[in-house]
Image (cartoon, rainbow, N blue to C red):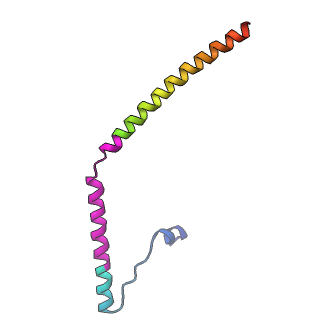
Amino acid sequence: MTSKQRQTHREIIPADNYESLLRQFSALKSLNFYLEEQLTFYRNKDYTLSELRLKSLESQLESEKEMNAILTRELDDQTQKEDQE
């Protein structure tokens, strides 16, 4: 086993008596149940609000780009007028 495999892989050593094995099994069962609940939650989560917020931010960004373009043109025009004088 390489050092990278050791970092990502943890060997689970079963307990040597029935009571400890039962405790391990119960803990793994609880963990599995929790992870299934989390997965169900994220699968069913409504991401619509996030999409609406993203569209709003995109709209704001486009508006700011347009305003920056206008201000840049006005600044260029003013600079040209000053250079001509």
* x and y percentages locating residue 14 in the rendered image: 36, 84
* x and y percentages locating residue 42 in the rendered image: 30, 56
The residue shown at (36%, 91%) is 16
Is residue 25 located in the magenta-colored stretch of the structure? no
* x and y percentages locating residue 39 in the rendered image: 29, 60
Q: Hey, which quadrant is residue 34 in on the image? A: bottom left
Q: Tell me the quarter of the image containing the C terminus.
A: top right
The residue shown at (54%, 24%) is 68
With respect to residue 40, does 28 lie above or below? below
With respect to residue 14, does 34 lie above or below? above
Q: Which residues, given as a range, are shown in magenta?
A: 27-51
Is residue 35 located in the magenta-colored stretch of the structure? yes
* x and y percentages locating residue 40 in the rendered image: 26, 59
The residue shown at (49%, 28%) is 64
With respect to residue 54, does 73 lie above or below? above
Q: Hey, which quadrant is residue 49 in on the image? A: top left
Left or right for 7, reference 47: right
Front position in the image: 51 or 14: 51
Majority SS type along the magenta span: helix
Left or right for 43, reference 64: left
Judged from this view, the residue extending furthest toward the top is 84
Front position in the image: 2 or 71: 71
Front position in the image: 26 or 44: 44
The residue shown at (68%, 11%) is 80
Q: Hey, which quadrant is residue 28 in on the image? A: bottom left
Count of number-bearing discs: 0
With respect to residue 77, does 3 lie above or below? below
